[in-house]
Amino acid sequence: MNFSKASLALLVALTTANCEYSLKRYASEEEAPAGDFILDVDDLVIEDATKAGVSSNEFQLLTNGTTNLGCTEGADGQPTTGFGTVNNSVSLNSFAVYMGETFSFPFTIKPTAVVLRVKRTGNPSANAIVELTDLAAGAPDESDVVATSSTIAMSGFATGSGSDQTFTFATAPTLNASTSYAVVLRGVNGSGTVDGSNTINWRLGNDTSDCSDFDVLQNSSNTGSTWANDATGAVPYFHFVVPAFQATGAGYWIVDGGSSTSWDMASFDIDENPNGDKPGTITYDIGVGADSSTPSYSQTGLSLAQVKALTGLTGRYLYVRVVLNSAYTNMSSSGIGNGAVSEAD
């Protein structure tokens, strides 16, 4: 029987009567050398479909709600992460004045929103907006805006101690790991009135012991052309709303060698985090045996390099289990793409 090129490399065999799953090769001589087996993520047996799944050709951890990342103030006026007390605020009182806070995180995030604790004084009638920008010479770069939020009417801001206002992004931006950005709060020109007695304030705290990355607030009086420090050693309250991920998830392949087979694990390869930006860990459990439906593992918790270093694995079926783990308290995911393994020559 001949197969088209599009169908070469892998056959998933399903025996309905006893629910056996295995991977078999049927590569033509011209398309692949004998012994090559493609490990396709679409053929993984997923152990818990509520924890991990396949999307965009990647087996990855699923989201599990959202979490907040940044500096937040509790309803009682105390920061929820334990730093400082509210002692100050910085005003935005004209369309020429921008306020910017620089930040960076040790891992890549894709925030759906940013929340600022703000209040109004008087009756400003304009709209407020938040921009995320790259930096130039340590200051917000208004010529390089990464994302722009929805607008919020300043008239709806609370007075007194203020309240959290959620500025959402239509498309979640990618903020890369260990890269500095700025959160810029400004008014929307032409949307209403903001003046010296009708303004909004971004709330600050006075202790940066637990939030040292966010302790310099800058302002610009010329629509972002130049910037100066407005407050140093004071924490502007803000946080990003980012997806949270399941802590762990797993799936496995059963690779059928057709007969008792010596496996060349040096040939084993998996595309780890193929879509990038996922610093969570990936480990592998490996075993061989004669059971076509129930895998068993003699080696567990291995890295990719450790799997490739395995020798002496002989058996008809090769069992490959992939375990995905999140990082940074479930704020960052992990995933794999397709892989391959060969029989020993």
Image (spheres, rainbow, N blue to C red):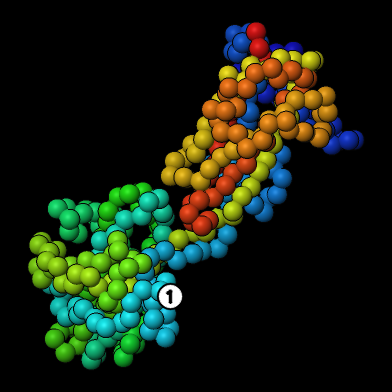
Quarter of the picture holding the N terminus: top right
Residue 214 placed where, x, y %? 28, 64
The residue shown at (11%, 66%) is: 228
Helix, strand or loop at label 1? It is loop
Q: Amino acid at mark 1?
A: Thr
Question: Is residue 10 depicted above or below 185 in this figure?
Answer: above
Q: Is residue 225 above or below residue 160?
A: above
Name the residue furthest front: 209
The x, y position of residue 281, in whole percent, is: 53, 43
Q: Is residue 180 left or right of residue 164?
A: left
Q: Is residue 77 above or below residue 266?
A: below
> Is residue 338 found left or right of 213 in the rendered image?
right
Instruction: Find residue 17 and report its horizontal and vertical position in percent.
Output: 90, 35
Quarter-of-image position of residue 121: bottom left
The residue located at (47%, 45%) in the rendering is 278
Pick the front one: 279 or 251:
279
Residue depicted at 58% across the width and 59% down the height: 64
Of the 4 image quadrants, the one containing the C terminus is top right
- Residue 124's place in the image compared with 311, above or below, is below
